[in-house]
Structures are given as C-alpha cells and as structure tokens.
Amino acid sequence: MLSGNELLQAIKLIEQEKNIDREVIISGIKEGLQKAYEKFFDTDAVVRVDFDETTGKISMYQELTVVEEVDDD
C-alpha cells in the first residue's frame, strides 16, 4: 500500500520528469478513482473524491439522496 507521503513524492517526481502540471496529475488521480468506483461498484453512483495536498490523504464519498418515504427497499 502506498502511503500519502509516497504518493506526494511520486506526484512531484512525475511533475519534474514529465513536466506535467501538479493539478493535472491530481485531477487525473481523482478522476481515475471516481471512474473505477463507478465501474466496479455502482455505475449510477455520484462519487466525490477529495485529495489533501499536504498529507496525500485521499477520501471518497458517495452522494446519496435522502427521501421522506422509501419507494424501493
């Protein structure tokens, strides 16, 4: 498993070696995680991915709709 610090180092290395903007790299990581979740777990899910640029911590959230009455259990 890759730690947050190792991920940040890898991003910095890619940024330097390939001359790719840091924001583009982070955006690609976030989009990739979102697409993978949708593909393997729920194609209709609305997923938000947060990336803490100081610690390298990644958090994923599935947005759900709250209703008064459940139509389908």
Image (cartoon, rainbow, N blue to C red):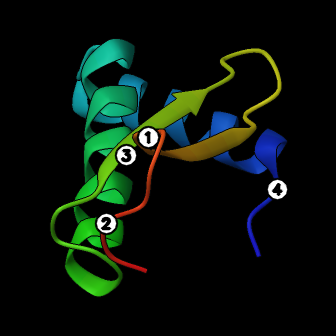
Question: For the residues marked 4 and 3, what is the alpha-carbon distance in whole angstroms?
Answer: 22 Å
Tell me the kind of residue under disc 4: Ser
| Callout 4 touching callout 2 (CB < 8 Å) | no
Indicate the position of residue 1 as horizontal and vertical percent values.
Answer: 77, 76
Name the element at disc 4: loop
- In the picture, measured across the screen, residue 57 lies left or right of residue 34, that is right
Question: For the residues marked 3 and 1, what is the alpha-carbon distance in whole angstroms?
Answer: 19 Å
> What residue do we see at 17% from left, 62% from top?
44
Name the element at disc 3: strand
Q: In front: mark 3 or mark 2?
A: 2
| Callout 3 touching callout 2 (CB < 8 Å) | no
Q: Which residue is mark 1?
A: 67
Name the element at disc 2: loop
Crowd class of label 4 (few under 14; some 14 to 19; many from 20; radius 10 Å): few
Crowd class of label 2 (few under 14; some 14 to 19; many from 20; radius 10 Å): few
Q: Which residue is mark 2?
A: 71
| The one of 50 and 61 positioned closer to us in this rendering | 61
Q: Earlier in the sequence, mark 4 or mark 3?
A: 4
Tell me the kind of residue under disc 1: Val
Tell me the kind of residue under disc 3: Val
Question: For the residues marked 4 and 2, what is the alpha-carbon distance in whole angstroms?
Answer: 42 Å
- In the picture, measured across the screen, residue 29 lies left or right of residue 28, that is right
Question: For the residues marked 2 and 1, what is the alpha-carbon distance in whole angstroms?
Answer: 9 Å
Q: Earlier in the sequence, mark 4 or mark 2?
A: 4
Question: For the residues marked 1 and 4, what is the alpha-carbon distance in whole angstroms?
Answer: 38 Å
Q: Earlier in the sequence, mark 3 or mark 1?
A: 3
| Callout 2 touching callout 1 (CB < 8 Å) | yes
Position above or below: 38 against 27: below
Indicate the position of residue 41 as horizontal and vertical percent values.
Answer: 35, 81
